[in-house]
Amino acid sequence: MVSARAISDLVVPGSGQSNWLITLSAAAMGFLAVFALALSVTSANLARGWSASLAQTATVRISAAADEMEAQTAIVLDVLRTTPGIAEARVMVAEDQAALLEAWLGPDLPLDALPLPRLIELRETEEGPDRQGLRLRLSAEAPGAVYDDHTRWRRPLVQAAARMRAFSVFSLVLIGAVMSAIIALAASASLASNGQVIKVLRLVGAKDRFIARAFVRRISRRAALGASVGTLAACLALLTMPELQGTAHLLAGIGFQGVGWVLPLVIPVLTTALAWVASMATAFHVLRGVT
């Protein structure tokens, strides 16, 4: 009996448009899949980082006349230090405020000429304070003080990162579906163009399952090779991306960290599995039509 590898070489020639199509499509989809996976991981890390950095923190903004600012600040600090749930309260110095505004107004800000409010940073305990009660107390004792627990800033950031992660996962599913369709079309074309070879193999006693497995073996090897090349190219591209330090931009630090670099290794494996399933289903469908 002819070996499975020999039948694979007969049914699926070593060169041809269908073979190149399988290899190139697997490489392209593997490349895109790595970036979609990296974006998904980065979005999840950003969501956790933004939530953790803003959790258990708050700010009190004091707006008052220059001659009343120090008195208002002292009153607010006294309120905060006597409020359960507040672990620490620190008045933000001018240099810290300049660093916050530098991204918007540029360096060397003339803070003395700007009517900036006084900011007090808070670190809360795990239980946190009675926020509504704290707001009422501040409004009564220091009318120019506004308590901000960062909820309105934290929620949109976390939602945006979660939405981006969902888009990334959808992109991975779409990439897999498109790759499966391309492989199925290439497998169908290759089998259809080798109808005479299939008939001869049947005459010598080869079963459809034997022919299909030999055919699928070649397709899977092509897909695995292409996906491995595409994955490697994408990983090298990620390594060359500069890191944007000190920014919360979504593209800052996109990629994998530490053991996270193991994740791209899953892509060639999944590609091979998809190629096997798609080409096997196509092979049996085409073989049923070859008489």
Image (cartoon, grey):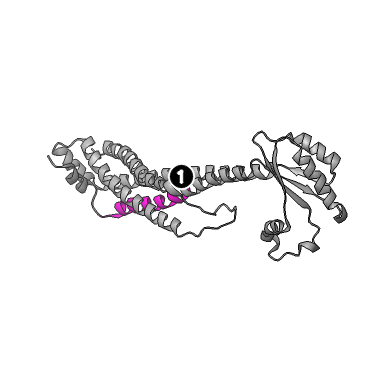
Where in the figure is residue 47, as x and y percent of width and height? 57, 44
Q: Overall secondary structure of the magenta stretch?
A: helix
Query: The disc labelled 1 sits on which kind of residue?
Result: Leu
In the rendered image, the quadrant that contains the N terminus is top left
Residue 79 visible, this angle: yes
Nearer to me, 282 or 76: 76
Residue depicted at 45% across the width and 42% down the height: 173
Tell which residue pokes out farthest to the bottom in this image: 108
Q: Quadrant of residue 129?
A: top right
* Residue of label 1: 172
Tell which residue pokes out farthest to the left in this image: 1
Where in the figure is residue 75, as x and y percent of width and height? 82, 44
Residue depicted at 71% across the width and 62% down the height: 105
Q: Secondary structure at mark 1?
A: helix
285 to the left or right of 84:
left
In the rendered image, the quadrant that contains the C terminus is top left
Residue range of the region highlighted in magenta in the rendering? 15-36
Nearer to me, 79 or 60: 79
Q: Quadrant of residue 285?
A: top left
154 to the left or right of 171:
right
How crowded pointer 1 is (Cα within 10 Å; few <14, some 14-19, many 20+) is rated as many
226 to the left or right of 165:
left
Residue 21 visible, this angle: no
Residue depicted at 41% across the width and 48% down the height: 261
Is 30 in the magenta?
A: yes
Is 153 in the magenta?
A: no
Q: Quadrant of residue 136?
A: top right
Where in the figure is residue 128, as x and y percent of width and height? 68, 35
